[in-house]
Image: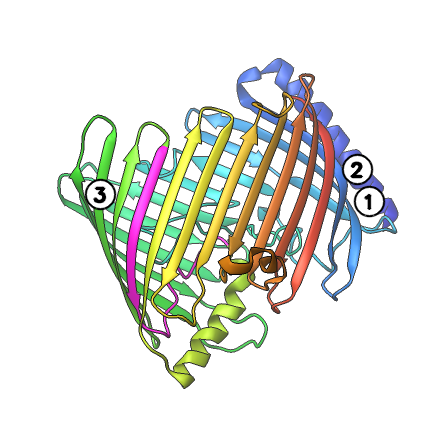
Amino acid sequence: MFFKGKKILILILVVSCLTVYSKQKADYTITAMDLQYGVESYDNGQGIKENFFRIRVLPEFQLLPDTRLGLDLSFIFDKDGSIKTDHYQGDNGFWSKINFLEHGVYKSEKYIRAGFLEKITLGNGSIFNNYSNKTRYPEKPKKSGLIARIENKHDDGYEFMMDDLSKPSIFAIRKFIMPVDDVVIGLTYAMDRKPDSIHYTSESVKIYGLDFITPIYLGFGKNIYLYEDLTRIKGHGSAFTTGLKYDSNSDFKAKVEFNSYSSNFIPKYFDTYYEAEKDKKFQKLRYIDMTGGKRIRSLNLFAQKQFGSFLGVELFTEYFDRNDLSPTLKLNVGLKDWILPEGLKVDWEYYNKNVDYSNFHANRKNSDVYIKTDFTYITPQGAELTVTRKRLVNEKGNVEYLTSFMTGFKLK
């Protein structure tokens, strides 16, 4: 196995050399080229922490004026120098080496992307809200999904989403029309064929949704929209959502949203952390179906602000009308330059679905807390250093800490 690993390392070096050579011959084809290597520490799948050596080559190509390709030639080795295949079952296929294959711009008239998916929202976000298929990567096998959008000259069209092209489980399709200017009505059907990866039940989760949005003020780059959604999880509960959304060209966005839903309904079912929480969500649906519960009402507040090029802040919080439900808090902060040394960037993400504002220190031990911190430093010469620390709750409800220390350089 170690000999096989050495051959792959040699192959990567050859690819890197060929890429540099081709870049010198045809600059228009290669837009980026990164080489990264380092140590990652995470659960080996048996509850034991292990360190792995990882090497990645990340070339990006401009194939056509609107078509881009990014490869992820990533290989992981254990302490014996053997390629890690047991923990990455099925992660050696063609699609696992695709970082992205993209045509067009997201939310444009014609758009398609295969590979890693992030911040995928369909309609107003009552079903898919900032979904990502890379939440559990690299601890779990890589997923290469698909998102596509096509729109005709009348602003009517379709959106389609799939979580993984190799082993698809999640599907979604949305039909939307614009009956009058700037008014959009959409109908969404989404399904997870395998929502319970632990107990291997044959049940699936199917969600239907009707969404509507219309502007109530448009002018001078400051727009206000009214939106409403009706959503139902087949065999479970339903929800009604209404809200106001503010969007401006000055890098500021805000949203106020009211939700009313059955106790056996989970709003924004496919969110950023779904890949880690899918088992927990499915078991919650089944449990409440048996025990029952009162209808839930909640108020959501969201704000996003970019302060120049050095600071970005995103805040989300949710309050409930029941004392037995704690508020939700999500905070993202991105900082670079300003008070930091040139070339250093820090990204911090905090998500707590059970906040205790009276004793905030106690939230550190909460089993519903997700925290991710990234430190990235790039020198003027292109050398790169990245340190990542992540705290998440895995599929079994246990807290995992994952650490990554990567270095490398940018060839372009």
| Whole-percent x, y for residue 231 in the image | 29, 64
How far apart marks 1 and 2 lie (CA) works out to 6 Å
Question: Which residue is found at the position 63% from the left and 39% from the top?
Answer: 374
**Residue holding disc 1:** 5
Question: What amino acid is at disc 3?
Answer: Tyr
**Residue holding disc 3:** 225
Residue 404, magenta (yes or no): no
Question: What amino acid is at disc 1?
Answer: Gly
Q: Earlier in the sequence, mark 2 or mark 3?
A: 2
Q: Which mark is residue 9?
A: 2
- The stretch of residues the image draws in magenta is 252-272
Spot the residue most to the top.
25
Q: Nearer the viewer's eye, disc 1 or disc 3?
A: 3
In this picture, residue 44 sits left or right of residue 315 = right
- Element on which disc 2 rests: helix
Question: Which residue is found at the position 48% from the left and 53% from the top?
Answer: 272
The answer to whether the residue labelled 1 contacts the one labelled 2, judged by CB atoms less than 8 Å apart, is yes
